[in-house]
Amino acid sequence: MNRTQRIATAAAIGVVIVGAGAGVAVAGNDDGENTVTGREADKASQAALDYTHGGKVNAVERDSENGATWEVEVARTDGSQVDVRLDENYQLVVIEGDSETG
């Protein structure tokens, strides 16, 4: 492997490491909102499930409505859908019926 190839490989590895260490990844979805993954999203998911007493998390997004930082869409065990809005410390701001599901 020549010097140029080694430099290019090292740069590529650095990009992967920086990307993996970011902790939160954001990806646009079909409805134009940003789904979030990573350690912080996992904390938001667990907090939302604690507040809804279980269910299944369908999506985690960054949010700014009602003073919230996180919006977690949860399918409750009774089949209803709710949006759980949390502040930056994963404390409950509000639980709202999910308007997208009627």
Image (cartoon, helix red, strand yellow):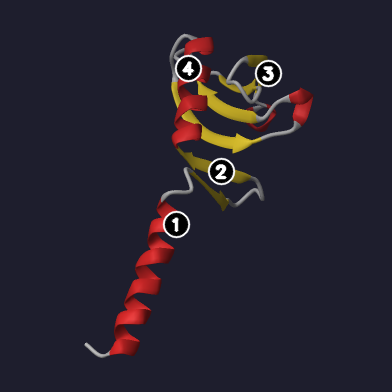
Q: Which residue is mark 2?
A: 35
User: Between disc 1 and disc 2, whose residue precedes?
Assistant: 1
- Pick the residue in front: 62 or 83: 62
Cβ atoms under marks 1 and 3 closer than 8 Å: no
Helix, strand or loop at disc 4? helix
Residue 37 against residue 91 in the figure, above or below? below
Residue 90 against residue 17 in the figure, above or below? above
User: Between disc 4 and disc 3, whose residue precedes?
Assistant: 4
The kind of residue on which mark 1 rests is Val
Q: Say which of marks 1 and 3 sits in front.
A: 1
Q: Which residue is mark 1?
A: 18
Q: Which residue is mark 3?
A: 96
From mark 2 to mark 4, how far is it between C-alphas?
Answer: 17 Å
The kind of residue on which mark 3 rests is Glu
The kind of residue on which mark 2 rests is Thr
At horizontal 60% and vertical 37% (from top left) the residue drawn is 61
From mark 3 to mark 2, how far is it between C-alphas?
Answer: 18 Å
Q: Say which of marks 4 and 1 sits in front.
A: 1
Q: Which residue is mark 4?
A: 49
Q: Say which of marks 3 and 2 sits in front.
A: 2
Please provide percent x and percent y for residue 19. Answer: 45, 56
